[in-house]
């Protein structure tokens, strides 16, 4: 019976994330918003980074956490296994050209992320605990004044609450425990217990606790990984131009077989580059809007500009470091896939055992941060469905699940999570398209005000 259910879930996942439904819909929505907003992600990127990393907060504005903390919470959820495992898989199955299509996904995805954050702040509410509550479930139900909006909002919240336990929790704790057991021999139950205790210490304090922790942890986590991969790239600097040349030359031609690499068609490069790019940055899923809604801000566009830097950092920066490391060391021709491919690149690129340790520790840190970010997404989703009384029990159950996730093989949980993530995206994308007029109007008003010196 379980095998039949698993087979059905795999078939559903392949269809939802295949070339005929979600991938073209995600790309088309990102392209449409890019055109509708006149390339706001390109025109305002410098201003966005200034708001995120220099201004960082709006003193006295309504909200629970600062702009920077909201960004770090969202980055905690997205900078995860996709940046290490996903990039390697894209290259292994789609060739170096897949990285180009991953970049393209990130560039249009910045407009999608911008739109999600803008609407999340625009339609957020103050809940019974006095905290901000927002995200797709609120802008769908409040922004689309009909039964359709209420149904779409409920469906998003339902799928999100379930997905949080899978891709945002048990799959991640399993990845952490597996990496630490393989590299350092740490028993799975020990890793599971530590993960649960650490996660509980942060999660049970709510969004302000999560924001304070991620504000410190996420920059350190990303910085440490980029330093490690940066050293590998620096030691192979003479190969970097050729590696970048491969990304562009193979993007439109496919990749011939070389070494242990079996070759890839142009279609495979596009498919895996786009799919892994979306998996990494989550643009279009709507999840990051939940964190954006908690930000202290008077102006939805300001947080939207900050939030779109998440996709830039995740895909255009962190994923690029992984890709260039794999390509410049030549590891991509080994025939390996996933985490094993990234580990080989680091081991070959650094002396001693440093390479393998860096990947194992980075994978553990990335996965743990994802647990924190998704815990907040899940609790706000369950709050929307059942009210604030369900939040504390949900947090406790989430922490317990992180322990058991470390102990057992989770093929079914992983597959079900893929399905739930895809089903989250569908109502969200419908909402973004229907509310694109609101997004464009808010953006025009802010930018006109900014040109006259009246906006931050």
Image (cartoon, rainbow, N blue to C red):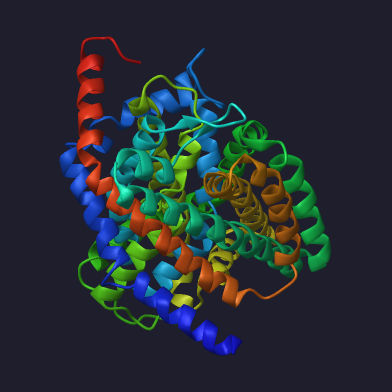
Q: In terms of depth relative to the viewer, which is nearer, 287 or 263?
A: 287
Q: Which quarter of the image is occupied by the C terminus?
A: top left
75 above or below 188?
above
The x and y percentages for residue 417 are 52, 66
The x and y percentages for residue 450 are 26, 16
The x and y percentages for residue 310 are 43, 41
Residue at the top extreme, as displayed: 453
How many numbered dots are placed on residues in this image?
0
Residue 96 visible? The answer is no
Q: Which quarter of the image is occupied by the N terminus?
A: bottom right
Residue at image x 80%, y 54%? 194
Residue 49 visible? The answer is yes
Residue at image x 52%, y 71%? 416
Q: In terms of depth relative to the viewer, which is nearer, 373 or 326?
A: 373
Q: In terms of depth relative to the viewer, which is nearer, 228 or 396?
A: 396
Residue at image x 28%, y 10%? 454
**284 relative to 337 in the view: left or right:** left
**210 relative to 299 in the view: left or right:** right
Residue 333, image quadrant: bottom left
Residue 26, image quadrant: bottom left
Q: In terms of depth relative to the viewer, which is nearer, 346 or 383?
A: 383
**235 relative to 210 in the view: left or right:** left
**97 relative to 332 in the view: left or right:** left
89 above or below 444?
below
The x and y percentages for residue 291 are 50, 38
349 above or below 269?
above
Residue at image x 30%, y 64%? 23
């Amino acid at each position: 019976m379980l095998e039949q259910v698993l087979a059905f879930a795999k078939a559903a996942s392949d269809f939802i994330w295949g070339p005929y439904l979600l991938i073209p819909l995600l790309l088309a929505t990102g392209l449409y918003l890019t055109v509708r907003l006149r390339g706001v992600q390109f025109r305002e990127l410098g201003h966005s980074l200034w708001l995120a990393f220099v201004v960082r907060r709006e003193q006295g504005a309504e909200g629970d956490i600062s702009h920077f903390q909201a960004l770090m919470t969202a980055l905690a959820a997205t900078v995860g296994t996709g940046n290490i495992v996903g990039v390697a898989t894209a290259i292994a199955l789609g060739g170096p050209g897949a990285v180009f299509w991953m970049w393209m996904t990130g560039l249009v995805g910045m407009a999608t992320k911008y739109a999600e954050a803008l609407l999340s702040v625009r339609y957020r509410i103050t809940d019974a605990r006095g905290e901000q509550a927002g995200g797709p479930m609120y802008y769908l139900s409040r922004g689309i004044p009909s039964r359709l909006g209420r149904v779409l909002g409920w469906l998003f919240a339902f799928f999100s609450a379930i997905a949080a336990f899978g891709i945002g929790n048990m799959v991640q704790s399993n990845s952490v425990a597996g990496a630490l057991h393989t590299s350092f021999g740490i028993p799975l139950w020990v890793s599971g217990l530590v993960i649960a205790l650490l996660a509980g210490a942060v999660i049970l304090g709510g969004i302000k606790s999560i924001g304070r922790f991620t504000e410190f942890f996420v920059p350190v986590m990303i910085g440490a990984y980029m330093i490690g991969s940066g050293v590998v790239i620096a030691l192979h600097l003479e190969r970097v131009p050729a590696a970048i040349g491969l990304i562009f030359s193979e993007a439109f031609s496919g990749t011939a077989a070389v070494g242990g690499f079996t070759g890839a068609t142009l279609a495979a490069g596009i498919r895996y580059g786009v799919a892994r790019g979306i998996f990494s940055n989550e643009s279009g899923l709507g999840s990051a809007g939940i964190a954006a809604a908690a930000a202290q801000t008077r102006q939805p566009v300001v947080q939207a500009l900050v939030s779109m830097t998440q996709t830039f950092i995740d895909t255009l920066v962190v994923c690029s470091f992984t890709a260039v490391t794999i390509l410049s060391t030549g590891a991509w021709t080994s025939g390996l896939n996933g985490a094993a491919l990234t580990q080989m690149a680091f081991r070959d690129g650094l002396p001693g055992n440093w390479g393998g340790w860096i990947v194992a520790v980075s994978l553990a840190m990335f996965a743990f941060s994802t647990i924190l970010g998704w815990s907040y997404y899940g609790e706000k989703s369950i709050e929307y469905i059942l009210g604030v009384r369900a939040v504390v029990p949900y947090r406790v159950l989430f922490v317990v699940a992180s322990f058991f996730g470390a102990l057992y093989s989770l093929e079914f949980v992983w597959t079900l999570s893929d399905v739930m993530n895809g089903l989250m995206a569908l109502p969200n994308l419908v909402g973004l398209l229907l509310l694109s007029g609101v997004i464009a109007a808010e953006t025009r008003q802010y930018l006109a005000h900014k040109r006259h010196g009246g906006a931050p």
